[in-house]
Amino acid sequence: MRIDDVRPPHCHARARRLLAEVIQIRDEMGRSEDGRPALDVGGAHPREVYFAAIATWAKVERLAGELGVRTARFTHVAPDLRDIRPGDVLAVIDGLLGNVELIAQRLHLAERCAEPPVEQDRQPSDVLATLVRVNREVSRALERPFSPGDVYGAVAAAASYAARLGGAAELAPFERGRRPRDCYERLLACQTKVAALIAARGQVAAVVRGTPADVVPGDVYDLASLVAGELAFLYSLTPGAHALLALEPTPQGQRLPADVDQLARTLEAQLAAIK
């Protein structure tokens, strides 16, 4: 299929196959499923699905590393964040499938999951929600789940974009006793502010609603990656913008949820300062 012929329903079917493959791996490793309700998201575009797929890549890569599997590096860099198409998303999902199949081989899983039929009414939001399910199931299989340090790297990437957009703010005061749920809710507020800034430039952003039950750092990482991606997109709309930073967040070592919350509150102030 040519890249220009790919539509969200094709991405959804492929993402469902990826989910089935990951569930098979998680089961083989003796881990229980993540039974929480799906992410409530609406109005997503291919670019936001692309950002979610990058977060998925990071989690699959960690699982592969833990199992001693050499996987392909992320290479499908979209040429223009203003024009990410379903074909770009499908290319990343196909790369993820290739890496997941290598993991399955390491576990001696010979069976491959069939791709479900294409459902023509599926939208980018459905693909995004499916990839978040993939992320949750991969997280269940990890010996070293994503930590506040990983989340801090994603929020730091978002803060860097906000600074390039003119969002100057002092570092927020440190507050002890923060939990992943606090960080998630703070980043939801940041996503709302980013969406408003994108709307002010004549574009539309996805709406993420509600906070998952029993939030873990991996959930916060997924949301932080989306916020960073949306800020990268917002920066790409700036006339005369210089080359974009890398979209893949960099882990920041040992951090507490309170460190993430402090940086997320700083990011919120940065976003408020952007004209």
Image: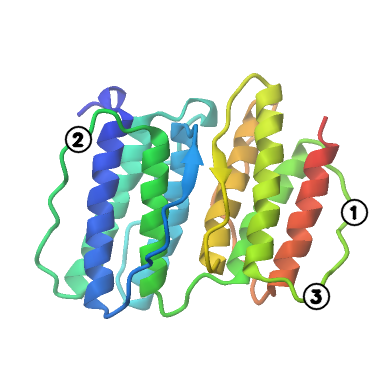
Indicate which disc, 2 or 1, sits on the residue closer to the N terminus: 2
Q: Nearer the viewer, mark 3 or mark 1?
A: 3
Can see residue 242?
no
Q: CA distance from mark 2 to mark 3?
A: 48 Å
Could you tell whether 18 is left or right of 224 in the image?
left
How many other residues sit within 10 Å of disc 1, few (<14), some (14-19) or many (≥20)? few
Residue at figure coordinates x 71%, y 39% from the top left:
193
Residue at figure coordinates x 41%, y 80% from the top left:
143
Name the amino acid type tagged 1: Glu
Could you tell whether 175 is left or right of 64 in the image?
right
Percent position of residue 274, x then y: 81, 35
Name the amino acid type tagged 2: Val
Q: Quadrant of the N terminus?
A: top left
Q: Is residue 260 above or below residue 53?
A: below
Q: Quadrant of the C terminus?
A: top right
Q: Specify the quadrant of the image occupied by residue 164.
A: top right
How many other residues sit within 10 Å of disc 3, few (<14), some (14-19) or many (≥20)? few
Q: Secondary structure at mark 3?
A: loop
The residue that disc 2 covers is 118
Residue at figure coordinates x 60%, y 34% from the top left:
233
Q: Nearer the viewer, residue 259 or 162?
A: 259
Name the amino acid type tagged 3: Arg
Q: Nearer the viewer, mark 2 or mark 1?
A: 2
Percent position of residue 224, x then y: 60, 53
Could you tell whether 28 is left or right of 180 in the image?
left
The residue that disc 3 covers is 176
